[in-house]
Image: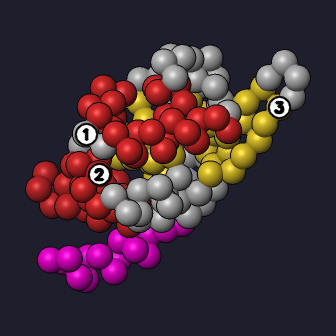
Amino acid sequence: SRYPKQSRRLSQLYPADARVQKELNTFFENISPALKSEVVNFIFSSAIKHNPIWKQQPAFQQILIYNIKMQMKQPEVTCVNQGELSTDFYIIAEVSAISMFALGVAASIYQELYQGQYFGEVAILAESARTATVITRNYTTLGFVSKSYLLETLDRFPNLKAEIKLSLQLY
């Protein structure tokens, strides 16, 4: 990284709490767009490297990160609702867990998601409504890209798209 001191400080911001989230917001308000882009790239490149599917796809990682936008959420905030139409794909950028649950006719499914994991792909790739509700448990930093950007990016990586679609069978 060109900014080793800042990189060390950024890596200390996880898991986030209220004070740290406020500090990060203030930091983002006071830096240039170019530096903001580098910081977002640093945060999400670190998170994406934790994902076993994307680990071996550095070109995909770079393309995805290029257009990622960041959101910071407080605890107990609903990110997406089961049954909604999907407009975005999300990546978790911090270690704190968030809860994902799906209420079905026969049973309910509960899963915790962590750094580097993602959600929103099922509804996008299956061209259906969202299959789960996702709620933050703690202060959470998420990255997101639009449905159209994700689909365009995955079209450039057909093997990766096939692997992700294969994982949809779990749902």
Residue located at (69% from left, 50% from top)? 112
Q: Secondary structure at mark 3?
A: strand
Residue located at (25% from left, 39% from top)? 156
From the top left corner, tell me how far across and down residue 38 is, in percent. 20, 61
Q: Name which of mark 3 and mark 1 comes first in the sequence.
A: 3
In the depicted view, which residue is nearer to us: 51 or 25? 51
Q: Is residue 137 left or right of residue 139?
A: right
Q: Which residue is mark 3?
A: 108
| Mark 1 burial class by Cα count in 10 Å: few <14, some 14-19, many 20+ | few
Viewer can see residue 89: yes
> Magenta segment, which residues?
1-18
Q: Is residue 120 left or right of residue 148?
A: right
Residue located at (84% from left, 18% from top)? 105
User: Which numbered circle lies on residue 24?
Assistant: none
The kind of residue tagged 2 is Phe
> Does residue 42 sit above or below 68 in this rendering?
below
Between marks 2 and 1, how big is the CA–CA gap?
A: 9 Å
From the top left corner, tell me how far across and down residue 167 is, in percent. 58, 42
The kind of residue tagged 1 is Arg
In the depicted view, which residue is nearer to us: 134 or 49? 49
Q: Are marks 2 and 1 in contact (CB under 8 Å)?
A: yes
Residue 123 drawn in magenta: no
Q: Name which of mark 2 and mark 1 comes first in the sequence.
A: 2
The kind of residue tagged 3 is Ser
Quarter in which the N terminus is drawn: bottom left
Q: Which residue is mark 1?
A: 156
| Mark 2 burial class by Cα count in 10 Å: few <14, some 14-19, many 20+ | some
Q: Which residue is mark 2?
A: 60
